[in-house]
Image: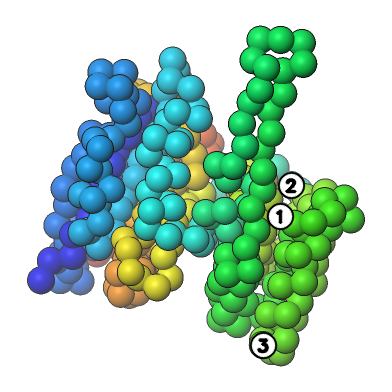
Amino acid sequence: MAQRIAVIPGDGIGPEVVEATRTALDAVADVHGLDLAYDDFDWSCRRYVEQGAMMPEDGLDILREYDAILLGAVGWPGVPDHVSLWGLLIPIRRTFRQYVNLRPVAVLEGVQSPLRDARPGDVDLVVVRENVEGEYSEIGGRMNRGFPDEMAVQESVFTRAGVTRVVDFAFDLARTRGGYLTSATKSNGIVHTLPFWDEVVAERAAEFPDVRWDAEHIDALAAKLVLEPGRFDVIVGSNLFGDILSDLAAAVAGSIGVAPSANLDPTRTFPSMFEPVHGSAPDIAGQGTADPVGTLWSASMMLDHLGHQEAGADLLAAVRATIRSPATRTRDLGGTAGTREVVEAVAARIRA
């Protein structure tokens, strides 16, 4: 039986990198005998402008029946970012209980890190971001709009169940990697939620005696991630901290254009969603120069999640091999290739 994938190309360079990734997935499917079926959905900022909504009212019911979701990018000038985010991505993440946002980061051979001592093989870490609660809650509001005493209130929500499940996932992941976990906190300044986070992390750590762990205040952790990125293995953080740290780590690795992510429901009750970390980049949309590596790597993670670990590894290996040469790297990475040249080289390596 075919595994069904809902494809949401989105805005800007999203359709370009998704189309390229489909080419590579077709090659992987041919080589490994996979039966993957795709349905495309035009849910985007363009749809919002034309119809007043990022997706139809029954969009979540439509997606519920799929095995996975592949997303390109969302965002376009003229549509506020909070409209596009809360109209599409966040409802998908929360309705489908995708409580883990998984973001691997590595310095790839052929990609120059802005840090002098960050070389391929030295930086290889994963940020595990809590993805459905924390600082990105819906609780709050604004009062006295337009008056001098206008105010805005935003509440953070940290539940024992929510912190426990993401921390357990991170400890389990650390067991399969270097056996080292770092918890991002700010319990010296945020008096309720982050001491609670620390308490839960310490409680759960007792269940994983084989994993070495420590906690770092977010400001110091951001500095150490730049000064000594090779030190870290698995970093777990709240919704806000994980979001910021993963983008910082991607910059350390040389480009946010190569950074992947997975929005996971580890229980597999609902479909998980896979997307590059980069945005829609409207300034280069339609030029054929977009870097597809972040989406290709995300697709590799999707194959892993669907139970095709060997196929996922082959796709990622082809990406890593291709990016070594300037002739098959995009211009943002110092190469000379366009999107199409990169993916054709990846597909050729897979088929070889």
Quadrant of image for the N terminus: bottom left
**Quadrant in the picture for residue 18:** top left
Q: How far separated are the C-alphas under marks 2 and 3?
A: 36 Å
At 70% from the left and 76% from the top, the residue drawn is 180
Residue 66 is tagged as none
Q: What amino acid is found at the position of numbered circle 3 in the picture?
A: Glu
Residue identified by numbered label 3 = 207
Residue identified by numbered label 2 = 115
Please determine whether, in this image, residue 104 is positioned above or below residue 139. below
In the displayed orientation, state which residue is furthest to the front: 144
Please determine whether, in this image, residue 282 is positioned above or below residue 43. above
Q: Is residue 291 visible?
A: yes
Q: What amino acid is found at the position of numbered circle 2 in the picture?
A: Leu
**Quadrant in the picture for residue 96:** bottom left
Towards the viewer: 72 or 337: 72
Does label 2 or label 3 sit earlier along the sequence?
2
Asked whether, in this view, residue 60 is left or right of residue 170, the answer is left
Does label 3 or label 1 sit earlier along the sequence?
1
Find residue 138 and report its horizontal and vertical position in percent: 55, 42
Disc 3, disc 1: CB below 8 Å?
no
Per the image, label 3 sits on a secondary structure element best described as loop
Disc 1, disc 2: CB below 8 Å?
yes
Q: Is residue 21 visible?
A: no
Per the image, label 2 sits on a secondary structure element best described as loop
Disc 2, disc 3: CB below 8 Å?
no
> How many marks do you count on the picture?
3
